């Protein structure tokens, strides 16, 4: 028998296929700048852009669960399942941008390509096939010709061993008529309760002075808060039910369920001092920032007070997502979506500076 969640995924798949076919449908005259989010994930970049007054036009990703989360949180946008290397996908994106260009509304491309091949927590393999997506995004920018673009990835991407790929990426961008400015920023300096260094590539029609960008970003820096303050107001969560349904309203804050830990694991966590521990089940410290949240085989960090791993909602809080941003998909995949996302407060700061220096007017 197929589970409720599996039924929802199959239904979402059909929805995205219909969305792809209807991507060329007529759009009303746009009244705000438009955004295309490539490798959109659950939509962290799009949330930042929406908060800055942009219209989210389309999100593209290969992960159905991420697309489902994206489509639920951005119901007016198209959600296209597919690769940024797909000619069909790029043609659909180009068609969706036509009304914006006809209305002389600025357009922007955002992208957070897969980082597992570059990340210290991933394969760190220069030949990882996921690394190829970065250059594919550069080709998409060159083809779609937005007014500007912003691409984000792990800071390890700028290591010497990835130099050839970065040069290909930047050469492709430059051949499209753009300039590239690199930055490495720590989300902790922008109000995110987490140490998280990220590389950003600001793609513009005119060259930017790196020091000017950095000076503008100083205006957005703010003190971050510790884990206890970040998670304030969240009650002790119930344990996830066996028949968990990601579309059901269980009352309270969404995505706030505890993992089904065994007594042995709970005792193990309880014995770990806050702020210490192995990569798996490392405990948060109540007054300090969280370490970088990772996805994959490693367990999420443990709560600083309760003997359990943090919930998806708590991870979202540490990433800077508001509680009304709901995450869909299987229970395990929800955590992966959240930890892979760009922290919205950091994205908003970089986007604000990029838009101002690009002289793009917002609604």
Image: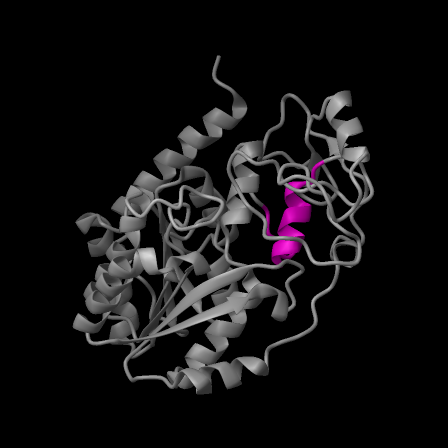
The picture quadrant where one finds residue 90 is bottom left
Q: How is the image coloured?
A: one colour
315 falls in the magenta region? yes
The residue shown at (73%, 22%) is 262
Judged from this view, the residue extending furthest toward the top is: 1
Segment tinted magenta in the rendering:
309-326
Identify whether 145 is placed above or below 243: below
Query: At which x and y percent is residue 44?
Result: 50, 57
- The reply to whether residue 233 is in sight is yes
Name which residue lies at 39% across and 46% down: 124
Task: Tell how many labels.
Answer: 0
* Side of 35 relative to 23 (left or right): right
Query: Of 115 and 321, which appears nearest the observer?
Result: 115
Query: Is 53 positioned to the left or the right of 140 in the image?
Result: right
Q: Position of residue 29 (x, y in %)?
A: 33, 71
Q: Is residue 63 above or below residue 353?
A: above
Q: Position of residue 337 (x, y in %)?
A: 51, 44
The reply to whether residue 82 is visible in this rendering is no
Please name the residue shown 55% across and 39% down the image.
334
Drawn side of residue 37 relative to residue 229, left or right? left
Residue 62 drawn at (x, y percent): 35, 42
Q: Does the magenta run of residues contain 161?
A: no
């Amino acid at each position: 028998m197929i589970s409720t969640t599996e039924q929802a995924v199959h239904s979402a798949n059909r929805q995205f296929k219909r969305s792809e076919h209807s991507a060329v449908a007529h759009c009303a005259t746009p009244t705000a700048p438009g955004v295309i989010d490539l490798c959109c994930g659950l939509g962290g970049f799009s949330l930042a852009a929406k908060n800055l007054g942009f219209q989210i036009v389309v999100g593209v990703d290969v992960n159905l669960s991420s697309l489902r989360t994206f489509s639920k949180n951005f119901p007016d946008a198209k959600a296209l399942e597919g690769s940024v290397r797909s000619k069909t996908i790029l043609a659909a994106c180009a068609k969706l941008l036509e009304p914006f260009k006809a209305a002389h509304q600025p357009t922007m491309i955002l992208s957070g390509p897969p980082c597992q091949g570059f990340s210290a927590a991933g394969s760190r393999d220069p030949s990882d096939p996921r690394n190829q997506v970065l250059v594919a995004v550069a080709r998409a920018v060159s083809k779609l010709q937005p007014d500007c673009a912003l691409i984000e990835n792990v800071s390890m991407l700028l290591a010497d061993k990835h130099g050839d790929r970065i040069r290909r990426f930047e050469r492709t961008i430059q051949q499209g008529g753009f300039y590239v400015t690199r930055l490495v920023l720590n989300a902790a300096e922008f109000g995110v309760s987490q140490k998280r260094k990220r590389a950003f590539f600001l793609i513009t029609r005119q060259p930017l002075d790196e020091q000017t960008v950095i000076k503008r970003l100083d205006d957005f820096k703010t003190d971050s808060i510790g884990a206890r303050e970040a998670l304030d107001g969240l009650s002790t969560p119930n344990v996830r039910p066996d028949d968990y349904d990601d579309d059901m309203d269980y009352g309270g804050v969404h995505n706030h369920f505890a993992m089904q830990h065994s007594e042995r694991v709970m005792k193990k966590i309880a014995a770990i001092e806050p702020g210490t521990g192995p990569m798996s089940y490392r405990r948060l410290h109540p007054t300090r920032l969280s370490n970088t949240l990772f996805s994959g085989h490693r367990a999420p960090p443990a709560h600083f007070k309760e003997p359990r791993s943090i919930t998806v909602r708590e991870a979202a809080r540490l990433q800077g997502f508001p509680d009304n941003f709901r995450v869909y998909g299987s229970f395990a995949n929800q955590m992966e979506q959240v930890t892979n996302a760009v922290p919205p407060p950091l994205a908003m700061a970089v986007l604000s500076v990029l838009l101002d220096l690009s002289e793009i007017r917002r609604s």
